[in-house]
Image (spheres, rainbow, N blue to C red):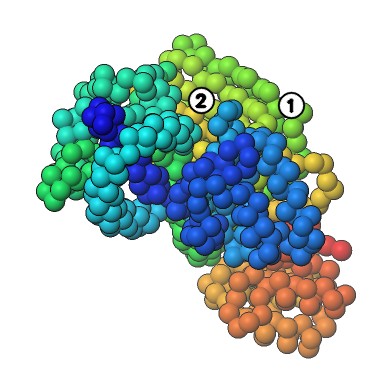
């Protein structure tokens, strides 16, 4: 018997089974069919993901048998079964590459990617994309499951290798068969979108797949010449060296790290090392499986960021409503006090600064409402490129000559239904932030483009599939670390020196993007500059009507105190707010009747025919809100002036309120609102 052939065959058997074991450990399903549509290779995940009985997977199984099994259990609907099978078998014979997603009857969504391999057949990968794969809890569970399966498979491999050694000694011809099987396994591992390798206990690579060539330019035909220290770099290798040591002591490990591939591309990788045991306590080598999880990690970070922003938005929205009531009382009483003759000499020194501080507080609340997506927007169809061009004249003169501002506008014509003023404010914020990041030296680029988001990219951005306009502001400044990126949209968070910024600029930009149906994306690393991109939905022109917030009129528009106007109904559950607004109405010439809730207001409206004006708060206890009060007043048909007040103006605008007055407000603004609401 040829001893060399037997040894070679023995090595091939162990490698064949070892690689098959590695494939069975991968969560993605895999199949390889030959030119006759017969199964050549597969793994357990394929049978599990598609719900096939384990007995259906065997060498030479026909593709037709799997299609027919699916058709018989209703996977393709209620149509003609034979026709459904025929169409799919004919499509498979074309051996065309494809990348599709299919929803199974049980609700599972599978991503199916096919790759033709001329002369060998067709490889297909199956991935379960139903759940978010980037949950750390799920990762820990998968690792624990992987370790358990490795232990089970190690025992099976040891027994299998002993059986194969005996078989090789009895049949020399089996060696050539194993050589063909090894070549086939090489094709399989090269088709998998992952790095697969095997190194022995002396840290010498014995096998690497084509992924190493794609990532690092390494020749897979000479694995023994490969040095992890060289292609990873000393810094990265020193970080992963402790994990390698654990694996060589018999412990399966999974770890994540950052690497730089050919062309200087940075990726986040996840590697699993699975020790191969010759006997208990003796490790003869390790299998290595490495995946690119860059996009997965970015999706996870964006999901966490979105959840945090949503919670902060709900908090700030609720606080803003209460603060608007407080500021209404403060501003109203300060304004009334400033008009008293005996305090005129204190106005400039005491009252004016207090009123200015209250107005700044009102502006601050508007910023918080913008962040929480509760600030009213005046939307219209806007050409993005024209809107971007219009800000140049606003910002150009504020930038020093040492800073270059360039535009690359590629989105025209592109219409989106947004608030043009808020878009301009957002871009101004981003450009001025970029100016600070570059320390007024370098380059700022403003770019626009139309992008089509597929399912994968849309999920990463938490947006629906479809077309979007991308507006980005890029700088070559100092960049941001991960801690800063995680907090950049939080209200009052700022990296500027004390007194140089409120920390609401980026929060308002975030709120504008989300309220417009889009999102904001930040790509930045320390020393590599920053790219902040607004993603806004692309719209076709449609007829739409929006209701703007009532703007204040001039002082000359106010009625004189001597004018007899009529009887006004004032509705608000806060007695202090009613006191301020009652004073305003009396000074305008109204007689005032008050109600502290919506139910009481409805009774007064029904029983008091002389009412000519209604001023009502929106949010009130008791089950009847201000919108119901004003709608009832309009139905009576005899009340000329109806005004709603609220800190949540956007909600009222969306619900079709007749006239909306945002708290806090002055007497002039109240008079203007009453005038604007006249029939």
Tell me the residue at 30%/23% (across/down): 223
| Residue furthest front in the image | 1
Q: Position of residue 350 (x, y in %)?
A: 43, 51
The quadrant where residue 397 appears: top right
Which tag, 1 or 2, sits closer to the chain's start? 1
The quadrant where residue 479 appears: top left
Q: Which label was assigned to residue 283?
A: none
Q: Position of residue 67 (x, y in %)?
A: 65, 54
Categorize mark 2 by other alpha carbons within 10 Å: few (<14), some (14-19), many (20+): many
Residue for badge 1: 412
Classify mark 2: helix, strand or loop. Answer: strand
Between residues 566 and 495, which one lies in front from this camera angle?
495
Residue for badge 2: 474
Between residues 511 and 324, which one lies in front from this camera angle?
511
Tell me the residue at 68%/23% (across/down): 410
Categorize mark 1 by other alpha carbons within 10 Å: few (<14), some (14-19), many (20+): some
Q: Is residue 604 above or below residue 38?
A: below
Q: Position of residue 374 (x, y in %)?
A: 59, 56
Q: Report, in whole angstroms, how far the alpha carbon at label 1 lies from the one at label 2.
A: 20 Å
Q: Is residue 531 above or below residue 485?
A: above
Q: Is residue 616 visible?
A: yes
Q: Is residue 117 left or right of residue 497?
A: right
Q: Is residue 361 visible?
A: no
The quadrant the C terminus occupies is: bottom right
| Residue furthest top in the image | 401
Q: Is residue 265 above or below residue 283?
A: above
Q: Is residue 546 above or below residue 1?
A: below
Q: Position of residue 8 (x, y in %)?
A: 28, 30
């Amino acid at each position: 018997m040829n001893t060399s052939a037997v040894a070679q065959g023995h090595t091939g058997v162990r490698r064949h089974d070892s690689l098959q074991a590695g494939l069975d450990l991968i969560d993605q399903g895999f199949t390889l069919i030959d030119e006759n549509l017969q199964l050549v290779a597969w793994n357990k995940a394929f049978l599990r993901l598609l719900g096939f009985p384990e007995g259906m997977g065997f060498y030479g199984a026909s593709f037709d048998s799997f299609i027919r099994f699916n058709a018989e259990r209703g996977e393709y609907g209620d149509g003609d079964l034979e026709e459904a099978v025929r169409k799919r078998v004919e499509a498979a014979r074309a051996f065309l590459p494809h990348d599709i997603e299919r929803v199974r009857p049980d609700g599972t969504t599978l991503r199916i990617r096919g790759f033709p391999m001329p002369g060998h057949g067709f490889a297909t990968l199956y991935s379960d994309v139903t759940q978010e794969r980037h949950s750390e809890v799920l990762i820990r569970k998968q690792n624990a499951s992987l370790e358990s399966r490795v232990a089970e498979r190690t025992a099976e491999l040891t027994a299998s290798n002993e059986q194969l050694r005996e078989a090789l000694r009895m049949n020399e011809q089996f060696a050539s068969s194993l050589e063909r099987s090894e070549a086939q396994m090489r094709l399989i591992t090269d088709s998998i979108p992952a790095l697969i390798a095997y190194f022995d206990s002396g840290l010498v690579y014995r096998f690497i797949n084509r992924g190493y060539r794609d990532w690092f330019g390494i020749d897979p035909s000479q694995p023994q010449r490969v040095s992890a220290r060289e292609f990873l770099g000393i810094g990265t290798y020193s970080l992963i060296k402790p994990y390698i040591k654990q694996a060589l002591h018999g412990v399966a490990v999974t770890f994540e790290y950052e690497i730089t591939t050919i062309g200087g591309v940075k990726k986040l990788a996840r590697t699993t090392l699975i020790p191969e045991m010759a006997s208990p306590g003796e490790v003869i080598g390790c299998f290595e499986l490495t995946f690119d999880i860059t996009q997965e990690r970015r999706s996870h970070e964006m999901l966490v960021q979105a959840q945090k922003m949503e919670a902060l938005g709900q908090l700030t929205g609720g606080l803003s409503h209460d603060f608007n009531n407080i500021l209404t009382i403060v501003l109203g009483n300060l304004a009334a006090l400033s008009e008293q003759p005996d305090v005129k000499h204190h106005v400039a020194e005491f009252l004016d600064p207090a009123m200015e501080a209250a107005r700044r507080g009102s502006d601050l609340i508007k910023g918080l409402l913008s962040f929480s997506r509760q600030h009213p927007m005046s939307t219209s169809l806007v050409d993005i490129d024209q809107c971007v061009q219009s800000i140049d004249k606003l910002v150009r003169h504020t930038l020093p000559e040492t800073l270059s501002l360039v535009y690359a506008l590629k989105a025209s014509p592109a219409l989106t239904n947004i608030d043009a003023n808020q878009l301009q404010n957002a871009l101004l914020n981003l450009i001025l932030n970029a100016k600070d990041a570059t320390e007024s030296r370098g380059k700022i680029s403003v770019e626009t483009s139309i992008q089509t988001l597929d399912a994968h990219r849309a999920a990463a951005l938490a947006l629906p599939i479809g077309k979007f306009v991308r507006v980005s502001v890029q700088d070559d400044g100092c960049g941001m670390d991960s801690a800063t990126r995680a907090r950049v949209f939080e209200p009052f968070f700022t990296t500027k020196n004390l007194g140089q910024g409120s920390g609401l600029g980026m929060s308002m930009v975030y709120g504008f993007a989300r309220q417009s149906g889009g999102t904001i994306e930040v790509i930045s690393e320390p020393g590599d500059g920053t790219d902040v991109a607004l993603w806004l939905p692309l719209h076709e022109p449609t007829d739409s009507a929006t209701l703007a917030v009532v703007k204040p009129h001039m002082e000359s528009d106010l009625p004189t105190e001597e004018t007899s106007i009529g009887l006004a109904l004032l509705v608000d559950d806060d007695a202090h707010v009613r006191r301020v607004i009652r004073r305003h109405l009396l000074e305008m010439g109204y007689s005032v009747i008050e109600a502290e809730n919506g139910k009481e207001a409805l009774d007064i409206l029904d029983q008091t025919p002389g009412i000519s004006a209604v001023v009502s708060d929106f949010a009130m206890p008791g089950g009847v809100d201000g919108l119901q009060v004003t709608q009832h007043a309009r139905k009576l048909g005899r009340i000329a002036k109806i005004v709603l007040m609220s800190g949540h103006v956007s909600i009222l605008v969306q619900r079709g309120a007749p006239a909306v007055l945002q708290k806090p407000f002055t007497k002039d603004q109240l008079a203007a609102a009453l005038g604007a609401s006249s029939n």
